Amino acid sequence: MIFTVDDTIRWLHKTSAKMTEQVDYLTVLDDMIGDGDHGLNMVRGFQAIVNDLAVIENNEARLTVADLLKRSSQQLLKSVGGASGILYATAFYKMATVFQTTARINHLAFEKALAEAVKGIKRRGNVNSGEKTLLDVWVAMLTLFEESDKFPESEIIEQTARTAMENTKTYAATKGKAALYEEASLGHIDPGAASTYYLFASLAETCKENEDG
């Protein structure tokens, strides 16, 4: 599979739709161990991305996958407050830097992009895997790509992201506002991990459409 500009546009549109559909659930999760604004932040951020895509399409601009992710990173920085906007923007920007160097975005290129995104999130957020943050889902996705010799099947992408999200229930939070809840955060899904699940569930749907032709 080669990941294209059209794939990227569909991925971003699907993610925006999922964030809107699940805004109440994300809000409930964040009410439990955060500020309660993660859902609205994600809706605002990805709607800004979709609005920017509409401008691009209307202008018939010929942009690359790297260009689209860089623009998306900028939209997230401008429209989303708090750590989540910075970390999502960092991940997208780091992926773009890898995609900028390759004409064909295959499994290996996507793996390298995920690796850079993980490094960027770790540095920018001062977080590590297992600390009940969105990073846990990104790391699981990177591991999946590293262990695959081709683009993983859509069903496996979705299942991997879902499992990583649900596993955050077993961790006590040590970062961000959730860390204030300490052991009380056990049993709760991290809201950032949940929104990241929707990001990769949308990627899985995009891949599924390609699988089905």
Image (cartoon, rainbow, N blue to C red):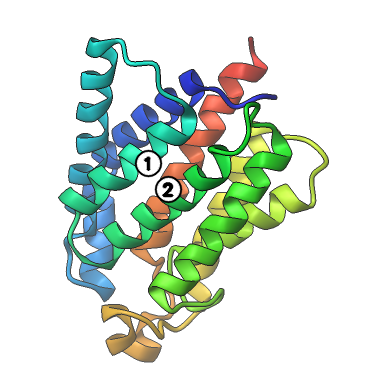
Front label number (2 vs 1): 1
Q: Residue at x 40, y 24 (%)?
A: 9
Q: Residue at x 46, y 28 (%)?
A: 8
In the image, 45 versus 164, the foreground residue is: 45
**SS at mark 1?**
helix
Q: Residue furthest front?
A: 101
Vertical arrangement, residue 66 with respect to residue 24, above or below: above
Q: Callout 2: few (<14), some (14-19), or many (20+) C-alpha neighbours within 10 Å?
A: many
Residue 45 in which image quadrant: top left
Residue 160 percent coordinates (x, y): 62, 50
Residue 6 percent coordinates (x, y): 47, 18
Q: Residue at x 67, y 40 (%)?
A: 109
Residue at image mark 1: 70
Q: Earlier in the sequence, mark 2 or mark 1?
A: 1
**SS at mark 2?**
helix
In the image, 119 versus 155, the foreground residue is: 119
Where, quadrant-wise, is the C terminus in this rendering?
top right
Residue 67 percent coordinates (x, y): 41, 33
Instruction: Measure how far apart labels 2 and 1 are at the Cα level.
Output: 7 Å
Q: Is residue 12 left or right of residue 151?
A: left
Q: Is residue 138 visible?
A: yes
Residue at image mark 2: 92
Vertical arrangement, residue 210 with respect to residue 19, above or below: above
Inspect the image, locate mark 2, and give the three-letter code of the amino acid beneath it. Answer: Phe
